């Protein structure tokens, strides 16, 4: 029996005609993938896209979503979050329930979080700890990267087992001396071992020794207020670590992914490497595209809200990052969501910025911000938007083709943007479980109106409609990074 025709109604209204029956048609939306733009109906069955055509007709009962006037994108893929992370003497405020709920309401339907083991502990054991944090809580699908905070025989022996678990990417910190930081010898060990097992290595690129030196110098001079955090994290230290990481990856013959690239100095290193043919990939974050280091000045301890590593940079560099995205030198935008309450967590560093837990909330804001300040402002085409928030990260981290695109056979992870919808980011409406918003007051022009995770509506007009624990752990395949060489 063919599906009934959608009744005429105001363009852009999101209305389900029939109760959910396992079959759904998204009718009449403008579909945008990284490669294509077209008007089509999408037929969804058992959580997958099964047909894309000008006018689908489905046998049996079907739920119809009127997407006329809306833009249909692949559900967002945020490959950099820290939920429920023990860090700097506290634990990040969003757990897998609140973090993925905020993600869902903002149009992100897959996240990859970082397992960060303690030194001396089995990394496989740490993986089990992180799986337990997420299971029964996550509302959208999730995977994990494995951070390696040391490299020795035990870690080397565990790497293939970790990869077999579907954790196909490792991260090394070249910063956080005395905590997560690895030295160059250890980093080379990780690069070689990961390469052997087909995994991708990423780095937090800041020179931890330079940072430690500057922190001591500032402290000795009595400069311990929050405003000094960025002084202890200069762009030169990021550029140096980016350069070194790239050189070591070149020696190892391994691809490299740079997380949270914040400044043009580091971008120039990535560009130079890519221009000589080296496989180096990078992500930036909404905070580096949209916020700047003026927030650290004249703001008293409020500056702690934006204490993160790397820190916010000068405004002048932001256009370079946007250009880097357009030119394909930066392939993705992730959030590095690592939230801490201003009251009770950030204020652990009232006496010295060294004790301010590093990180900001952003996972729920990324898609709306990139749409407004990227697409609506003409800095990104709609296809570039789909690429940097979903398709590229999914491909780089082995989530493709189930995630990150709109194609027959892919998961029905979708975000329907209403280009006419206006809003404003605010703590009052945020789903982040923290007491402030890093983007308070940012106007939005175009917003996620309906979000689907494997065919289930998880958010409607910013309200959560999903189910706690419905998110599934994704065993990822090897990275598709080679296609960017
Ligand atoms: O300040 C940040 N970025 N906090 C999270 C941990 C990290 O370095 O990614
Ligand atoms: Zn980092
Ligand atoms: Zn991070």
Image (cartoon, helix red, strand yellow):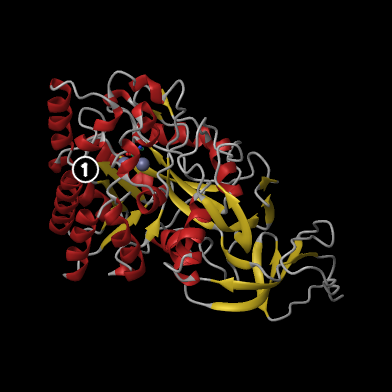
Q: Is residue 77 left or right of residue 458?
A: left
Whether 412 is drawn above or below 171: the answer is: below
Residue at image x 74%, y 61%? 14
Q: Is residue 477 left or right of residue 415?
A: left
Q: Which quadrant does ligand 1 occupy?
A: top left
Estimate the x, y position of residue 27 in percent, counting from the top left: 72, 71
Estimate the x, y position of residue 173 in percent, counting from the top left: 25, 40
Q: Is residue 65 left or right of residue 275?
A: right
Whether 1 is drawn above or below 437: the answer is: below
Whether 132 is drawn above or below 350: the answer is: below
Which picture quadrant has residue 43?
Answer: bottom right
Which residue is the extreme one toward the bottom?
A: 54
Q: Secondary structure at mark 1?
A: loop
The total number of labels drawn is: 1
What residue is disc 1 on? 206
Estimate the x, y position of residue 437 in percent, counting from the top left: 49, 38
Q: Would the CB of label 1 be found within 8 Å of ligand 2? A: yes
């Amino acid at each position: 029996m063919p599906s009934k025709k959608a009744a005429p109604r105001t363009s852009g209204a999101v209305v389900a005609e029939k109760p959910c029956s396992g079959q759904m048609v998204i009718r009449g939306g403008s579909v945008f993938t990284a490669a294509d733009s077209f008007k089509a109906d999408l037929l969804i069955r058992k959580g997958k896209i099964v047909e894309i055509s000008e006018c689908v007709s489905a046998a049996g009962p079907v739920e119809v979503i009127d997407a006329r006037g809306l833009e249909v994108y692949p559900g967002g893929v945020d490959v950099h979050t820290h939920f429920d992370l023990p860090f700097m003497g506290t634990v990040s405020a969003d757990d897998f329930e609140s973090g993925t709920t905020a993600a869902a309401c903002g149009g992100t339907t897959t996240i990859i979080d970082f397992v960060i083991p303690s030194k001396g502990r089995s990394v496989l054991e740490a993986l089990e700890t992180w799986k337990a944090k997420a299971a029964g809580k996550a509302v959208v699908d999730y995977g994990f990267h494995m951070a390696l905070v040391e490299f020795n025989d035990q870690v080397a022996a565990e790497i293939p087992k970790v990869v077999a678990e579907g954790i196909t990417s490792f991260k090394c910190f070249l910063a956080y001396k005395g905590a997560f930081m690895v030295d160059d010898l250890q980093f080379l060990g990780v690069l070689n071992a990961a390469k052997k097992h087909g995994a991708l290595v990423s780095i937090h690129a800041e020179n931890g020794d330079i940072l430690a030196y500057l922190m001591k110098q500032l402290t000795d001079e009595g400069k311990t207020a929050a405003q000094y955090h960025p002084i202890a994290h200069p762009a030169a230290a990021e550029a140096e670590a980016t350069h070194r990481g790239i050189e070591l990856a070149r020696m190892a013959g391994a691809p490299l992914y740079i997380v949270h690239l914040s400044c043009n100095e580091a971008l120039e290193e990535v560009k130079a490497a890519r221009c000589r043919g080296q496989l180096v990939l990078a992500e930036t974050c909404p905070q580096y595209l949209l916020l700047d280091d003026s927030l650290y000045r004249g703001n008293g301890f409020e500056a702690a809200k934006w204490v993160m590593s790397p820190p916010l940079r000068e405004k002048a560099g932001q256009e370079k990052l946007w250009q880097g995205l357009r030119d394909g030198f930066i392939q993705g935008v992730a959030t590095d969501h690592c939230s801490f309450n201003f009251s009770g967590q950030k204020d652990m560093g009232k006496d010295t910025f060294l004790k301010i837990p590093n990180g900001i909330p952003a996972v729920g804001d990324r898609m709306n911000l990139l749409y407004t300040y990227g697409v609506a402002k003409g800095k990104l085409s709609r296809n570039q938007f789909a690429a940097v928030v979903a398709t590229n990260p999914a491909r780089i981290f082995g989530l493709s083709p189930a995630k990150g695109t709109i194609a027959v056979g892919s998961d029905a992870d979708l975000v329907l943007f209403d280009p006419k919808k206006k809003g404003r980011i605010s703590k009052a409406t945020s789903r982040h479980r923290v007491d402030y918003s890093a983007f308070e007051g940012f106007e939005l022009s175009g917003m996620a109106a309906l979000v689907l995770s494997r065919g289930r509506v998880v958010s409607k007009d910013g309200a959560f409609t999903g189910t706690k624990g419905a998110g599934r752990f994704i065993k990822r395949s090897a990275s598709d990074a080679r296609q960017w060489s």
